[in-house]
C-alpha cells in the first residue's frame, strides 16, 4: 500500500520504516489491524478444522515412550558422543516414542548449509528409512527429520556420523547463519563464508562452546541482509570501504519472542581482525555473566558499552 513499487531493491519494510518514521509506521499497522480484526477474512475454529482435514498426519505407531527413554539412557552410558548429539541436536516430539532430529550442515571447512550430492542422496535414503520419507530445510541452514522413532535414533546417528552430518553444535557459535557472500553473490560487498570458517577454526573446542551456551551468529555480505545479521546475538555485516572488504559487528539482536534489532558495536574491522574481535566479545561475556546467563541475557543486563570498551581498547 505504501511501499516502493518502482524499484524492487527498495521494496523493503526497513526502507519504508526509515522513510515514514517508526511512529507513523506503527500507527498505520495498528489502524490496518483494527480494520482486519474480526472481519469476514478472520479464520474461526471451524475454518481451521476444515483446512486441517486436507493434511494427513504420518502413520504414527503407538509406542511405549518410557521403554524408549530407558533404552536411550542406556545408550548414553555406552557412548558420550551419542549422548551429546541427543542433547544438542534432538528435540522433543508431541507424539509418544518419536523425536525431532536436526542434521547439522556446519562442519568446519564447508560453507554453512552446504551439502554434497553424495550426502544429499544418502540423506534422502535416510529420510525414507527413518522419517516417513520427509525432510525439511530450515532458515538456520540445517535439515530436519521431523518424525523419528526414539528406538531408531542410535542407528540414525551412526549413519549421520559416517556422512559428517552429526556435529553436536545446534544453536552454538559454530552453527552460524551465513549468506553466500562475495564468493557467489554479485550483490555482496564482502565475502561471508571465510569469516564463518575463521570463527569456527578459532573456536574449535566444543566444550568451550557448550560453556558459552546458546549464541546466534549471523553473517551477511551486504545490506540486503540474507544472513539476518541484524537479528543475530552477534551479527557481522560485510561493507565496502574504498574497494576494500571490511566487517561491521553488531550485538544484541534477537529473532525470538522478544524480537530485537542488534546495535552496531562501532567502526568496522578488516577480515583478519574478526576472530580476535569475537574473542574479546566472548571474553567480556564470560567475565560479566551471572549464573545460568546466556549471552543475550548478559547483554541485556549490562548493555553494549562493556563490549565496546574491550574491543576498541588500545594496547598498552
Image (tube, rainbow, N blue to C red):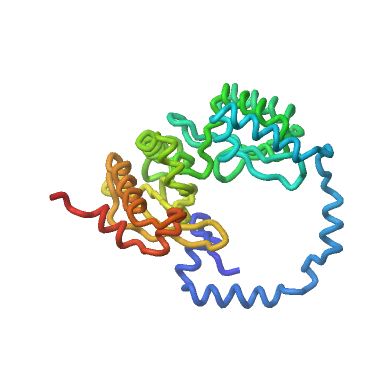
Q: Quadrant of residue 250?
A: bottom left
Tag count: 0
Between 116 and 45, the one lying in front of the other is: 45
* Residue at position x 60%, y 37% in the image: 86
Pinpoint residue 186: horizontal percent, then vertical percent.
Answer: 43, 41
Looking at the image, residue 85 lies above or below residue 284 = above
Residue at the image position 74 percent from the left and 48 percent from the top: 94
The image position of residue 146, as x and y in percent, is 70, 40
Residue 244 appears anywhere in the view = no
Q: Is residue 286 above or below residue 165?
A: below
Q: Nearer the viewer, residue 99 or 25?
A: 99
Q: Position of residue 95 (x, y in %)?
A: 77, 44
Q: Residue furthest left?
A: 316
Seen at 76% across and 40% down, the residue is 65
Task: Give the left or right position of residue 311, taking residue 193 as reference.
Answer: left
Check the image and report above or below for 26 versus 167. below
State which quarter of the image contains the N terminus. bottom right
The x, y position of residue 283, in whole percent, is 32, 49
Residue 152 shows up from this direction? yes
User: Which picture quadrant has residue 75?
Assistant: top right
User: Which residue shows up at 77% across the image and 74% down it?
Assistant: 39
- Please determine whether, in this image, residue 45 is positioned above or below residue 168: below
Amino acid at each position: 500500500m505504501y511501499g516502493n513499487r518502482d524499484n524492487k531493491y527498495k521494496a523493503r519494510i526497513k526502507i519504508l520504516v526509515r522513510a515514514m518514521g517508526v511512529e507513523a509506521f506503527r500507527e498505520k499497522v495498528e489502524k490496518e489491524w483494527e480494520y482486519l480484526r474480526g472481519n469476514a477474512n478472520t479464520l474461526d475454529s471451524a475454518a481451521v478444522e476444515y483446512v486441517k482435514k486436507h493434511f494427513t498426519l504420518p502413520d504414527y505407531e503407538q509406542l511405549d515412550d518410557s521403554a524408549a527413554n530407558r533404552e536411550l539412557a542406556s545408550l548414553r552410558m555406552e557412548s558420550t558422543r551419542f549422548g551429546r548429539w541427543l542433547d544438542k541436536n534432538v528435540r522433543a516430539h508431541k507424539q509418544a516414542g518419536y523425536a525431532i532430529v536436526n542434521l547439522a550442515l556446519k562442519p568446519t571447512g564447508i560453507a554453512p548449509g552446504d551439502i554434497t550430492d553424495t550426502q544429499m542422496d544418502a540423506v534422502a535414503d535416510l529420510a525414507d528409512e527413518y522419517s516417513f520419507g520427509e525432510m525439511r530445510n530450515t532458515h538456520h541452514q540445517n535439515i530436519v527429520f521431523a518424525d523419528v522413532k526414539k528406538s531408531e535414533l542410535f542407528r540414525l546417528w551412526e549413519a549421520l556420523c559416517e556422512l559428517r552430518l552429526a556435529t553436536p553444535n545446534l544453536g552454538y557459535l559454530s552453527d552460524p547463519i551465513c549468506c553466500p557472500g562475495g564468493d557467489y553473490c554479485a550483490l555482496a560487498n564482502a565475502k561471508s563464508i571465510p569469516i564463518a570458517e575463521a570463527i569456527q577454526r578459532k573456536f574449535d573446542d566444543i566444550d568451550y562452546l557448550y560453556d558459552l551456551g546458546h549464541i546466534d551468529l549471523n553473517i551477511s555480505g551486504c545490506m540486503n541482509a540474507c544472513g539476518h545479521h541484524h537479528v543475530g546475538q552477534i551479527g557481522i555485516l560485510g561493507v565496502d570501504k574504498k574497494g576494500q572488504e571490511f566487517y561491521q559487528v553488531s550485538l544484541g539482536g534477537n529473532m525470538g519472542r522478544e524480537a530485537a534489532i542488534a546495535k552496531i558495536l562501532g567502526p568496522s574491522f578488516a577480515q583478519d581482525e574478526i576472530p580476535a574481535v569475537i574473542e574479546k566479545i566472548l571474553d567480556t561475556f564470560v567475565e560479566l555473566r551471572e549464573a545460568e546467563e546466556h549471552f543475550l541475557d548478559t547483554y541485556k543486563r549490562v548493555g553494549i558499552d562493556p563490549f565496546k570498551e574491550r574491543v576498541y581498547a588500545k594496547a598498552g
